[in-house]
Structures are given as C-alpha cells and as structure tokens.
Amino acid sequence: MERLLTSTTVNKYRISLPTLSSFIFTARSDASFIAHTLPGLFQMLKKANATPHVVVDTTMPGGVLGKTSSQTQLSGLLDELKSLQAEGHHFEIEQLSPDPKEVQKLSRIHFGAPYPETHCFRGYPIHGSIRQFHQKESDYVLHLDCDMLFYEEEGFSWIAEGIQLMESNADI
C-alpha cells in the first residue's frame, strides 16, 4: 500500500503499524501561550494514533531564556495543562527534574563524556531532549516543542507520511 495505513485500514487488514512515542516539551516561559498551541499539536498526534506526553521542565530557568523570557511559577504552568485536560484534551504530564546520575550516564552515551549540565547556555533542556530516546520502547520517537505550529490539510498527516517514508527507505 502506498500510504501509511490508517487505523480503519489496520482494523480491516489486521496489520500492525510501527509504534510512535511523542514528547512535547514545555517550560515556565511557555504558560502564556500553551492553551493556543498545544490543542493543535494534540490533534496532529491524534491523527497519527499517538498519545501525547507533555514533559514539563521543572528546573529553574537559566541561560539566555531564563534572563530574557517572562517566567510563570511551576504551579501556574501545571494549572494551564490541567485546564486543557479539563477541556477534554487527552495527554500525559511528566514533570522532569533531572537526576544527576542519569544526566551523566546519558551525556556519556550521546556526547562521549559525563557532562553534568542539563541545559545549554541558552537555557534549552538538552538532557530532556536526549532522555526521551531512552524512555519508551517504540519504533519512532517524535520530539516537539510546545511553541511549534503546523498546518495539515483535512485527512493528511505529515507524521504518518514521515513514518511511511522512513519505513520504505532502508537508508534512513
């Protein structure tokens, strides 16, 4: 079949599809806009039969982002997420407080040395970005940030198209 099979096609033919884990990263600086950006990301992930996992960076903001972006208390960010759930959006919330031993272990794997830093100089959560690849057993991992905006035509899923492309090309 030329396109990645939809859930109705899967049920009809009883074919198993590749598994997909999805992670949407958010931090205190994002509380003011997530009510506008996350629902679109949830809808896009629903089309790909993926359960959204919203990863909340619980650390104190630092770097350039911590100095230049307005910050909300962690409780305010969590309240915004709970409001979205109350509106009927289905997603899991994970609060990430990096464990120093895990940080060093994963940085050794990915960077060749046990670096203690969890964020880059700008304040972006580097540890959270690599940690996701070790969290779930799935064929594919999709990383999104909560400030990403996408457009998809009705009936189209760029996630499904991307997976189909990777599945059909052994070089990827």
Image (cartoon, grey):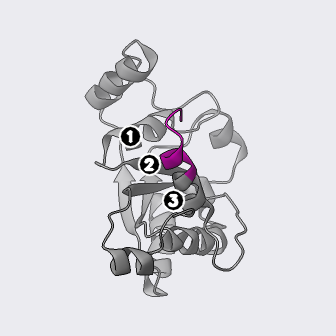
Q: Which residue is mark 2?
A: 141
Give the alpha-carbon distance from disc 2 to disc 3, as whole Å. Answer: 29 Å
Name the amino acid, label 3. Gln
Which quadrant of the structure image shows residue 118? top left
**Residue 91's disc number:** none
Q: Which residue is mark 1?
A: 133
Residue 9 is situated, as x and y percent measured from the top left of the image, at: 43, 77
Give the alpha-carbon distance from disc 1 to disc 3, as whole Å. Answer: 28 Å
* Residue at horizontal 48 percent and vertical 80 percent from the top: 83
Assess whether residue 27 is covered by the magenta stretch: no
The foreground one among 114 and 156 is 156
Secondary structure beneath dot 1 equals helix
* Residue at horizontal 50 percent and vertical 79 percent from the top: 84
Residue 106 in sight: yes
Name the amino acid, label 2. Val
- Magenta part of the protein: which range? 165-172
Residue 159 is situated, as x and y percent measured from the top left of the image, at: 56, 59
**Residue 73's disc number:** 3
Q: Is residue 127 left or right of residue 69?
A: left
Assess whether residue 167 is covered by the magenta stretch: yes
Crowding at label 2, few (<14), some or many (≥20) Cα neighbours within 10 Å?
A: some
Residue 27 in sight: no
In this view, the mark in front (2 or 3): 2
In the rendered image, the vertical position of residue 108 relative to residue 67, given as above or below: above
Look at the numbered discs 1 and 2 and tell me whether their residues touch, using CB distance below 8 Å. yes
Q: Earlier in the sequence, mark 2 or mark 3?
A: 3
Residue 6 is situated, as x and y percent measured from the top left of the image, at: 48, 73
